Amino acid sequence: QSALTQPASVSGSPGQSITISCTGTSSDVGSYNLVSWYQQHPGKAPKLMIYEGSKRPSGVSNRFSGSKSGNTASLTISGLQAEDEADYYCCSYAGSSTYVVFGGGTKLTVL
Amino acid sequence: EVQLVESGGGLVQPGGSLRLSCAASGFTVSSNYMSWVRQAPGKGLEWVSVIYSGGSTYYADSVKGRFTISRHNSKNTLYLQMNSLRAEDTAVYYCARGVVITTIPVAFDIWGQGTMVTVSS
């Protein structure tokens, strides 16, 4: 069982928006604004999409955005495109003993 | 080009050992916070270990006492020595460069392509 809870799957049609949630606890997501999100296509390495909750690395489309409320972080993808179909993972700092925890991943299907 | 290339994976028997390597280019391993992250077949990501630029190391409870992270500065290479391997260690192992604020990890911004480790008799 992963430390952070994500829905197993979400889906949307091209052009629509979807949101993926990532629920942790007051020891990780709730205590730090240090949630990152990764996109992983089949057989490929993860790619950083969002860091520090809402910041985008250079080169990542502004269709990707992040937010946080309490113990839950969210990734929103607007204007869905076929190439967005992938697995998405959230990650959070969890203190000096546990260090880093990942979510179980969410499979995004573009219908 | 900033790049990480892992090697050293393979098939090993339970109880055996394996050393993974991660060669970096385009940046200096010893000046960065470097981690290993693994992914069991069909499963999610699991953080394994980190080595800070200052040399401090940390491990997930699942590998503590069995795995050792290290680096060779002149070869600009990260290593993961894995001993007493178990079936549940079977996974693709990725090395990743971390972004930190002081000593707190923010994200993993550069990932290698991964190397597969299979523990089976």
Image (cartoon, helix red, strand yellow):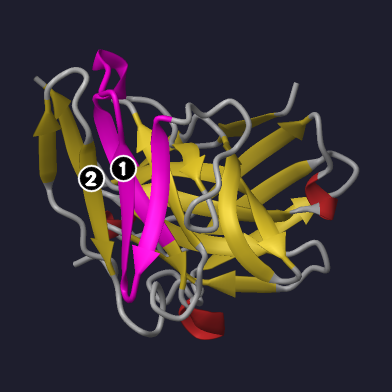
Residue for badge 2? A19
B89 and A49: which one is in front? A49
Please identify the residue farthest to the right as the structure is shown: B74
Up the image or down, A97 lies above or below A13; here it is below
- Is the stretch drawn in magenta largely helix, strand or loop? strand
Residue A30 among those drawn in magenta: no
Residue for point 30% across, 31% down: A78
Q: Secondary structure at mark 2?
A: strand
Q: Is residue B83 visible?
A: yes
- Residue B91 percent coordinates (x, y): 34, 45
Residue for point 59% across, 73% down: B58
**Alpha carbon distance from label 1 to label 2:** 4 Å
A69 and B95: which one is in front? A69
Q: Are marks 1 and 2 in contact (CB under 8 Å)?
A: yes
**Sequence-earlier tag: 1 or 2:** 2
Residue for badge 1? A76
- Residue A19 percent coordinates (x, y): 23, 45
- Label 1 lies in what chain? A
Around disc 1, counting alpha carbons within 10 Å, would you say few (fewer than 14), some (14 to 19), or many (20 or more)? some
Q: Secondary structure at mark 1?
A: strand
Around disc 2, counting alpha carbons within 10 Å, would you say few (fewer than 14), some (14 to 19), or many (20 or more)? some
- Residue A80 percent coordinates (x, y): 25, 23
- Residue B43 percent coordinates (x, y): 22, 47
Residue for point 39% across, 26% down: A44
Q: Which mark is residue B35?
A: none
Q: Which range of residues does the magenta coloring cover?
A: A63-91
Residue A68 among those drawn in magenta: yes
| Left or right: B1, with B121 as reference point | right
Q: Amino acid at mark 1?
A: Thr
